[in-house]
Amino acid sequence: CNSTKPRSSANNLINVDLSDQIKAATKENHFRAENTQLMLSYQKGQITLQQYKVLLFSLYEIYKALEEELDRNSSHPAVAPIYFPQELARLESLESDLEYFFGQDWEKRVIVPAATQRYKQRLRKIGQENPELLVAHAYTRYLGDLSGGQVLGKITQKSLGLSSKEGLSFFSFPGVSSPNRFKQLYRSRMNSVELTEEEKAAVLEEAVEAFELNIQVFDDLQKMLSIATETHQSRSDVGAARFTASPVLQFAVGLCVALATVGAAMYGM
């Protein structure tokens, strides 16, 4: 009797769905991501326009890399089952939001911290070398967006005092009539992906890495904003009469200083 127990336990482990394994493996990381300062501001309904704008820039860079790699690997056996560009793609929505806030030349104003660059580089690397790992990033990003999109969209609209939903396209999924049903379909498709045990273990590790990269982006953005605000206040105190540039330009100068400071700190670690 005793000899059958390990076999039963092993079989149970093998039969656990990939989506459930990812959820279990990333539980702690998920909690930490939700409790970063930037996300707590969201939950309290205290997101500022400056926070939202720099977040949009980082989301644009991340989704540009993710969706271009998914497109390029759309016929890969691990990617094809979870490839839903019509329903899930965020890039055009982000471009629309950025144009709303920054005008048609918004691409010239993109400023992102070092953590966003690392996230983007990671997506490019696995897209070229290990496309099956894109499953982990697509799952954590898209299902997270679908789960919280409507709520976060309403919080953002209220916090920023926006009278319409212009500038909030990122949170809208017009191609998905029922987020809950679509998430069930997505999980089912992902669970059908055929992976070796080694590949499955790598996907689980990558899902953890995806959350860590997100946490680093949130933390870097908050540092960047804090330094930019301090720089702006310092300049105002020291020479308000001499420095009469617009608030937007002053904030941009602060962001540049912040990026340099955060980048130097990261490389110094």
Image (cartoon, rainbow, N blue to C red):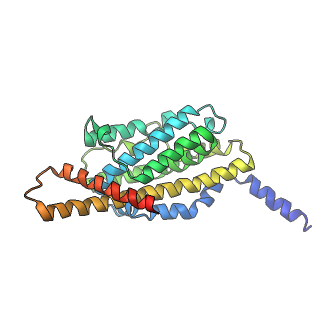
Answer above or below: position of 228 versus 188: below
Q: Residue furthest front?
A: 268
Residue that sits furthest to the bottom in the current view = 2
Vertical placement of residue 130 versus 25, above or below: above
Residue 262 lies, with reference to residue 74, above or below; the image says below
Q: Which x, y percent locates residue 87?
A: 49, 37
Which residue occupies the foreground of this view, 70 or 245?
245
Residue 126 location, quadrant: top right
Q: Is residue 102 left or right of residue 28?
A: left
Closer to us: 76 or 160: 76
Measuring 25% from the left and 38% from the top, which residue is drawn there?
Answer: 103
Regarding residue 262, the answer to whether it shows in the image is yes
Q: Position of residue 201 (x, y in %)?
A: 69, 53
Give the x, y percent position of residue 29. Answer: 54, 62
Q: Quadrant of the N terminus?
A: bottom right
Is residue 122 found left or right of 95 in the rendered image?
right
Q: Position of residue 90 (x, y in %)?
A: 44, 40
For the residue pair 23 and 69, the one nearer the viewer reads as 69
Residue 172 occupies quadrant: top left
Number of residue marks: 0
Residue 42 in view here: no
Instruction: State whether residue 67 is above or below residue 17.
Output: above
Tell me the residue at 53%/41% (across/down): 124
- Residue depicted at 49% across the width and 51% down the height: 144
Residue at the spot 50% in from the left edge and 35% down from the top edge: 68
